[in-house]
Image: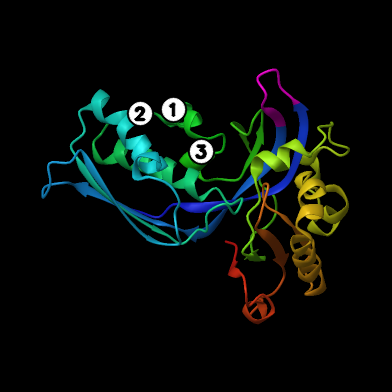
Amino acid sequence: MLLLPPCKINIGLNIVSRRPDGYHNLETVFYPIPLRDNLEFRELTHSDAPYELLLGGAPIQGEAADNLVVRVYLSLKDEFQLPPLSIHLYKHIPMGAGLGGGSSDAAAMMTGLNEAYELGLSTEEMQRRLASFGADCPFFVKSEPAYATGIGDELSPISPRLKGLYILLVKPDVFVSTREAYALVSPHPALYPLREAVMQPIETWREHVVNDFEQSVFPAHPELAAIKQTLYDMGAAYAAMSGSGSTLFGLFDRPTPEAKEVFKDCFVFNQKLR
């Protein structure tokens, strides 16, 4: 089975409060973006191993057993008596980018196994199981725009008016530690309700739709702030960092063919939203 897991951007990200368990309550809007990985699995017949993982594309750190697609498979294998699998993952979505690529791969693996082997898992059950692999994993079961609260796992539908706009993603060769980003941010209630703000014309977003992580990440990585300013200089109606970075995105009313030259040392993706 061949699957095409998409990525997402965070439109706004308010760190509202610190929880007793050490995590943070937040509010954000997850919006799916058609930059996709390739994930394929088939039954393993040429080896006695319980599984094999073949990787390609953008570099992936860590051991095979720690990869989320393997962990999802192993979490279901004994319960549903799944056969050994050969898993092929080709990464187009850069890692550590604030785009949720690993979480999307995990969700695709579960939904794909559910379909291929008729496991009978409902959408809600898959979302519940996936929450243990990452707070944004449940979003990718449907990959539909969602207003997220809690730690990012409580989802409700939302429909910001982005269709017809062009998105430009820019990721420099910069690593942002999520732990460090959270350590330097000061939780506080949002000054303007995000759910209401994203339903207003995009021209108003610059004043009301904010990513709290920019306050802690930009001083440590001024090149990210510079990219955001360049996106506005190019004519973006709105620009921001996605998640805790290090991807910046801009929303435009036109294509941006000049982006690869402007950001020639960065990963660049641009496409019309449909």
Q: x, y (%) of residue 254?
A: 69, 74
Q: Amino acid at mark 1?
A: Arg
Q: In the rendering, at what x and y percent does residue 131 appear?
A: 50, 30
Residue underneath mark 3: 137
Left/right placement of residue 51 relative to residue 128 reads left
Kind of element beneath mark 1: helix
Residue located at (55% from left, 45% from top)? 144
* x and y, in percent, of residue 123 in the image: 43, 32
Tell me the element at label 3: loop
Q: Residues within 10 Å of mark 3 (few under 14, many from 20)?
A: many
Q: Nearer the viewer, residue 41 or 172?
A: 172
Q: Is residue 37 above or below residue 63?
A: below
Residue 65 shown in magenta = no
- Identify residue type, mark 3: Cys
Whichever of callouts 1 and 3 sits on the residue coming sooner in the sequence is 1
Image coordinates for residue 31, horizontal then vertical, percent: 61, 49
Question: Which residue has dot 2 on it?
Answer: 121
- The colour scheme of the drawn protein is rainbow
Which residues are the magenta region?
A: 18-25
- C-alpha separation, residue under disc 1 versus residue under disc 2: 10 Å
| Mark sitting on residue 241 | none
Q: Which residue is mark 1?
A: 129
Of badges 2 and 3, nearer the viewer stands 3
Q: Amino acid at mark 2?
A: Leu
What secondary structure prevails in the magenta region? Answer: loop
Q: Are marks 1 and 2 in contact (CB under 8 Å)?
A: yes
Q: Are marks 2 and 3 in contact (CB under 8 Å)?
A: no
* Number of residues whose C-alpha sits closer than 10 Å to that of mark 2, classed few (under 14), some (14–19) or many (20 or more): some
Looking at the image, is mark 2 or mark 3 earlier in the sequence? 2
- Of tags 1 and 2, which is closer to the observer? 1
